[in-house]
Image: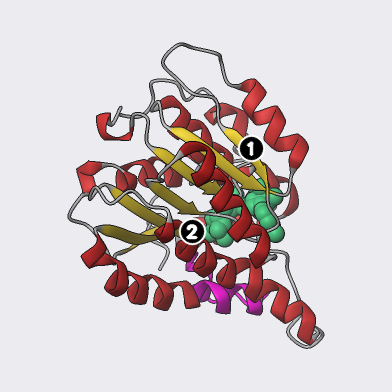
Amino acid sequence: MTSIYIKTEEYSSMENSTPIYDSLYKKKVIVTGGATGIGSYITRYFYEQGSQVFVLDIKKKESIDLVESLPNTKTKIKPEIYYCDLIDINSIEEVFKNIYTQFGYLDVLCNNAADDERHDWEKISSSEWDYFQNINLKSQFFCIREFSKYVSFNNGSSIICMGSISYLNGSTEMPSYTTAKSGIVGLVNTMANILGKKGIRINLIQPGWVMTEKQLSKWIDKKAEEMIEENQLLEGRISPDEPAKLVLFLASDQSKMITKQIINLDGGWV
Ligand SMILES: NC(=O)c1ccc[n+]([C@@H]2O[C@H](COP(=O)([O-])OP(=O)(O)OC[C@H]3O[C@@H](n4cnc5c(N)ncnc54)[C@H](O)[C@@H]3O)[C@@H](O)[C@H]2O)c1
C-alpha cells in the first residue's frame, strides 16, 4: 500500500484555480475561524472573488499573517479581522453589530470555526462536554441569528455551515464534537424553514478527512492513511481548497434555488 503525504503548500497557489462568480463581487462575507485551516482557504477564495471578507477568530497572529500574505490590488478588498471568541455570545453580538454599523448589510455567513480536539468519553467532564457543544454547535446558531438581523434582503443571502461526517463514519475519539456536528443537521433544517421566506438560503457541507496543516501534523500517520484508503471510494486526498470551492458555489447565485441541503465532501466515505 502506498502512503501519500500531501503538503498543504502544494495547494497554496490558488489564484485563477476557481471559477469567478460575478455575484460574489463586493459581497460582504463573514467567515468564522477564517484564520487557519479550511477557513483560511475560504477567506482567501472569497478575497479572490473581490468579496469583502470579515474574519472572526481567536488567532490574532495567524489572522494578520493571512491578510498580509494577500496581494494589494485595485479590484480586491483585503479582509477585515475581528477578534471574537465564539464561546462568548456577547462577543458574537457585539462583533456583528460593529461590522454592520461600519460596513452595512451582510450577504454571506460561513459558519466554519470548530474545535476537534480528541477527548475520552469515559473521562470528559461536564464543563468540557459543554465547551465542545458551545464552540461546535451553539456558536453556529448565534452567528446565524446575528447574521439574520443584519442581512441584505436581496435574495442573494446565503449561510453555509461546516459540519462533518465524523458522526456517521464510526469515529469514537471525540464524542462531544461528533454529537455537536450531528446537531448542525437539525439546526440547518430548522433554520432553512425559518429563513427561506426571508430569502436566506442555508446549506451544510460535511467534509471527510481534510488534509489541513493541523491534521497532517497531528493525526495523519500510516494508520490514518490506511483508513482513508480503505474507506474513501475515490483515490487521493481531500485538500482544504475542496470545501472552500464548494462554499463559493453555495454562496453564489449559481446555487440560488438550493437550500436545506447536506453535501458530503468525503470522497464517498459514508
Ligand atoms: N479538517 C478536517 O479533516 C475536517 C473534517 C470534517 C469537518 N471539518 C470541519 O471543517 C471546519 C474547519 O476545520 P479545520 O480542520 O480547518 O479546523 P481548524 O481547527 O484547523 O481551524 C479552526 C479555526 O477556528 C478557530 N476557532 C476555534 N475556536 C474558536 C473560538 N472559540 N472563537 C473563534 N474562533 C475559533 C481557530 O482559531 C481556527 O482558525 C470545522 O467546522 C471542522 O469541524 C474539518
- Segment colored magenta: 163-182
Q: Residue at x 77, y 86 (%)?
A: 126
The percent coordinates of residue 62 (x first, y second) are 72, 36
> Front-most of 153 and 69?
153
Q: Residue furthest left?
A: 257
Q: Which residue is drawn at 66% across and 48% down?
A: 57
User: Which residue was labeled with disc 1?
Assistant: 81
User: Which residue was labeled with disc 2?
Assistant: 208
Q: Work out whether 45 lies above or below 59.
A: above
Whether residue 2 can be seen here: no
- Does 110 sit left or right of 58 as displayed? left
The answer to whether the beta carbon of the residue marked 2 is less than 8 Å from any atom of ligand 1 is yes
Q: Does the magenta stretch include residue 167?
A: yes
Whether residue 62 can be seen here: yes
The percent coordinates of residue 48 (x first, y second) are 43, 25
Q: How much space separates mark 2 and mark 1, taking CA atoms? A: 28 Å
Total numbered labels: 2
Mark whose residue sits in front, 2 or 1 = 1
